[in-house]
Image (cartoon, helix red, strand yellow):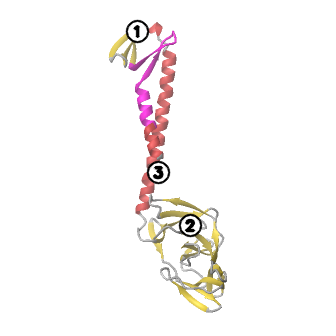
Amino acid sequence: MRRFVLAFLLLATGVWAINIKLYLKDGGYQLVREYKVEADRVRYYSLERSDWEEIPAELVDLKRTEAEAAERQKEIEKNTKASDEEEAVEREAQKEVRRIPQDPGVYFIDGGKTHVIAAAETNVRSNKGRSILKKLAPVPIVSGKSTLELDGAKSEHTFTNAEPEFYIQLSEQQRFGIAKLTPKGNVRIVENITVMPVSNEMVEEPVMVEIFRKQLTNDGMLYKIWPKQAMEPGEYAVIEYTDGKMNMQVWDFAIQRGK
């Protein structure tokens, strides 16, 4: 939409530039395509009569005519620059999209290369034991408290940049973001889960990091995400989920201090 508006403005100012107002000292003006001063005469091409005409130079307000023409030229240059910048941004965005595979998942770019983060296998721990969470077949959870966990105290994917940028290609329209994990022994807790008695309503409580998100495709399936503030060293994960469905997908990573 923005590009269309810019194109319209450029077209409008282009027409405006062609239609020059040749101001007269009596307050009127002639709408002309172009004009030139020849000795004591001003020769101009009349848009009204589609022909060349002449008028004594002493009757023409050249100062006002030239000042307005200069302002119009500035406006044309300004709009042209804005259009060029807009097209450059769009080209860069398209280039960015082409670098990300269409397969659902989480990716990052490092050293000019695109890398994939493998989805982690998660477990649900309750007083009944542990169950592996599968996206297509969520595990039943009894009433009470449970935790969604990842095995291992640390992620294999580490970043020294405290403001990493990720690309998430969704498989379907779902919520997503970055969660802070809580290490506990040899596991990392992704979220606490409470299942209400009787109603079996599920309340999921991940600790979310505030992020910026930028939609990169019109279908709303590819996003670029990054934290609003530098993240403290620790364990994190990009997550994708539907509230109350227990279908969370997790792509874990860690932030370490640079050496």
Local SS, label 1: strand
x%, y% of residue 205? 65, 75
Residue 259 in view, yes or no: no
Q: Is residue 207 left or right of residue 249?
A: right
**Residue 255 screen position, x and y as percent:** 60, 73
165 and 219: which one is in front?
219
Question: Tag 1: residue type?
Answer: Ile
At horizontal 50% and vertical 63% (from top left) the residue drawn is: 223
Q: Quadrant of residue 7?
A: top left
Q: Residue at x 39, y 18 (%)?
A: 35
Comes first in the chain, label 1 or label 2: 1
Q: Nearer the viewer, residue 21 or 65?
A: 21
Residue at image mark 3: 89
Q: Is residue 30 magenta?
A: yes
Q: Residue furthest bottom?
A: 128
Q: CA distance from mark 2 to mark 3?
A: 21 Å
Neighbours of disc 3 within 10 Å: few (<14), some (14-19), many (20+): few
Q: Quadrant of the C terminus?
A: bottom right
Which residue, given by chain and number where applicable, does mark 2 sit on? 164
Q: Rounded to the nearest whole Å, what is the CA distance between mark 1 and mark 2?
A: 68 Å
